Amino acid sequence: MNRPVRVLIADDQALLRTGFRLLIENAPGLTVAGEAAGGEQAVELALRLRPDVVLMDIRMPGTDGLEATRRICADPDAAGTRVLVLTTFDLDEYVYAALRGGASGFLLKDILPADLLTALRVVAAGDALLAPAVTRRLIQEFVGRHEPRPRPARELAGVTPREREVLRLVARGLPNHAIAEHLGLSVATVKTHVRRLLAKLHAHDRAQMVVIAYETGTVTAGGNLPPTG
């Protein structure tokens, strides 16, 4: 039997932590590894407990969730830990920073309980939580207002033209089956391209591929999503 997904809850509001704990502990295949009331404690517990996923609030006193995310994702001792950040629509500008800091995705705070549980499982399995309709809008709007420092084009050295096409579609939020349909490839072939891109770009998941695609100019803010039909 597979071990349960271990979740570290990081939120400065005790009531929310309690609610998350009750929800997670009563879900099959999930368990709470610990709770943190601030970013500094989240970093300490993530490195000590090594959970599968940190459910990270952004706005916390002292060390906020963005800094905590950067520190956790940059530490080799936490290589097996993914960070899933919590945000709200009025904090759009934080989403790009969270992804750039190493987060594997984000959730809106009004998420339905069942969707939260699904998100935790998705991220724990090594996938990025990138909902096309929401993530693409948030990243494009923010990048359009505050252009980040570009990464050097040499980071794409060795990436083939076909892999660039796949990278553009990943950055637009398309899942593998939609990329396969758009490019006329099998899903297995798309998975192979994604796997090679992860290695060539030194990205740990699709979320990091999105960041690199924007920062190298492979895609630009405001671009239209290619048709899939």
Image (cartoon, helix red, strand yellow):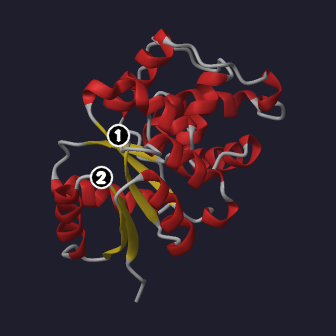
Give the total number of marks visible in the rendering.
2
The mark found on residue 12 in the picture is 2
Helix, strand or loop at mark 2: loop
Q: Quadrant of residue 156?
A: top right
Q: Is residue 57 above or below residue 173?
A: below
Q: Is residue 160 above or below residue 35?
A: above
Task: From the top left corner, tell me how far across and down residue 6 is, in percent.
Answer: 40, 73
Residue placed farthest to the bottom in the image? 1
Q: Is residue 5 above or below residue 148?
A: below
Task: From the top left corner, tell me how far across and down residue 141 is, in percent.
Answer: 41, 16
Q: Is residue 186 visible?
A: no
Look at 41% across and 40% down and name the residue there: 130
Q: Is residue 52 visible?
A: yes
Q: Earlier in the sequence, mark 1 or mark 2?
A: 2
CA neighbours of label 1 inside 10 A, class few (<14), some (14 to 19), many (20+): some
Helix, strand or loop at mark 1: loop
Look at 55% across and 33% down and name the residue there: 210
Q: Which residue is mark 1?
A: 59
Task: From the top left corner, tell me how far across and down residue 171 is, in percent.
Answer: 52, 30
CA neighbours of label 2 inside 10 A, class few (<14), some (14 to 19), many (20+): many
Nearer the observer, 121 or 38? 38
- Kindly check if marks 1 and 2 are in contact, taking CB atoms under 8 A apart as contact: yes
Task: From the top left corner, tell me how far across and down residue 38 is, in percent.
Answer: 39, 54
Q: Which three-letter amino acid code belongs to the residue tagged 2?
A: Asp
Nearer the observer, 156 or 80? 80
Residue placed farthest to the front in the image? 62
The mark found on residue 3 in the picture is none
Image quarter (top left, top right, bottom left or bottom right) of the C terminus: top left
Horizontal relation, residue 58 to residue 50: left or right: left
